[in-house]
């Protein structure tokens, strides 16, 4: 295999962010005294949060604004009253405490670390990802972990990839592979940086974009077959 460096996305590629997010939101709502209804409350939040992270990818909002704005929008949508700043702080606290790996992720990363230089590039908030990722059991296998808020650049901006590679050493772009679940940030970002990409697509979502990943793989076995066999 020609690759020397594997860049991983974190959430929904190695980490079960959906579980972390759901638990954190529930705990925050209960902390603020709401009679929590997951389908209604979390469903409303997910719709708002998905839209606002898209705005971040399109440079329509900053990461600092996102942290508070999503809960301001939630408050307005639900027609309730709470301090969005305090709500955001509580949510971040609970989210940072939820570090759940996808099944098989730890074994995959450990095996890959014997053959490749590994790094993580994640669009996320520093206070959350510091605890969830840098203190996880797999962090020791990564030479570097790049968090978008920390460096002030988000995927799919190619500059965050440049930053990540500069931290690792001197490599040609043909020696680098980006693996991630998001077409709009991971795959588009890798293509923008002119490196090969692997779309991790466990739910077999139809690609309705014009983006063409180098590989499309639906499970960790596929990644093993590509990189270890």
Image (tube, rainbow, N blue to C red):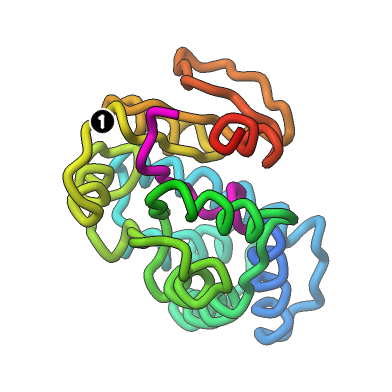
Give the quarter of the image for residue 146: bottom left
Q: Position of residue 45 (x, y in %)?
A: 63, 57
Residue 10 falls within the magenta-colored stretch: yes
Looking at this view, name the residue that lies furthest to the top.
210
Give the quarter of the image for residue 77: bottom right
In this rendering, position of residue 201 left or right of residue 8: right
Q: Position of residue 119 (x, y in %)?
A: 39, 54
**Residue located 48% across and 68% down the image:** 139
In this rendering, position of residue 123 left or right of residue 35: left
Q: Which residues are magenta?
A: 1-15
Of residue 169 and residue 144, the one placed in the foreground of this image is 169
Work out whether residue 134 can be spotted: yes
Residue 117 falls within the magenta-colored stretch: no
Query: Which element type, helix, strand or loop, lies under badge 1?
Result: helix
Of residue 15 and residue 1, the one placed in the foreground of this image is 1
**Residue located 27% across and 43% down the image:** 161
- Residue 229 in the image: above or below residue 53: above
Would you name the residue on which mark 1 appears? 173
Work out whether residue 16 can be spotted: no
Image quarter (top left, top right, bottom left or bottom right) of the C terminus = top right
Q: Position of residue 61 (x, y in %)?
A: 32, 50
**Residue located 73% across and 34% down the image:** 203
Of residue 36 and residue 185, the one placed in the foreground of this image is 185
């Amino acid at each position: 295999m020609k690759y020397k460096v594997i860049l991983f996305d974190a959430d929904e590629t190695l980490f079960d962010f959906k579980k972390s997010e759901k638990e954190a939101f529930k705990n925050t709502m209960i902390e603020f005294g709401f009679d929590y209804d997951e389908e209604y409350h979390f469903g409303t939040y997910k719709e708002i949060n998905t839209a606002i992270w898209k705005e971040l990818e399109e440079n329509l909002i900053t990461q600092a604004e996102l942290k508070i704005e999503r809960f301001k929008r939630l408050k307005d949508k639900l027609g309730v009253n709470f301090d969005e700043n305090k709500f955001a702080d509580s949510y971040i606290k609970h989210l940072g405490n939820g570090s759940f790996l996808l099944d098989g992720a730890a074994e995959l990363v450990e095996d890959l670390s014997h053959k490749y230089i590994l790094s993580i590039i994640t669009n996320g908030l520093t206070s959350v990802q510091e605890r969830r990722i840098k203190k996880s059991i797999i962090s020791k296998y990564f030479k570097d972990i790049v968090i978008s808020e920390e460096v002030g650049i988000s995927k799919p901006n190619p500059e965050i990839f440049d930053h990540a590679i500069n931290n690792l050493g001197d490599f040609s772009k043909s020696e680098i592979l980006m693996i991630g679940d998001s077409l709009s940030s991971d795959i588009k970002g890798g293509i923008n940086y002119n490196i090969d990409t692997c779309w991790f697509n466990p739910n077999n979502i139809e690609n309705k974009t014009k983006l063409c990943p180098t590989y499309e793989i639906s499970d960790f076995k596929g990644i093993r077959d590509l990189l270890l066999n």
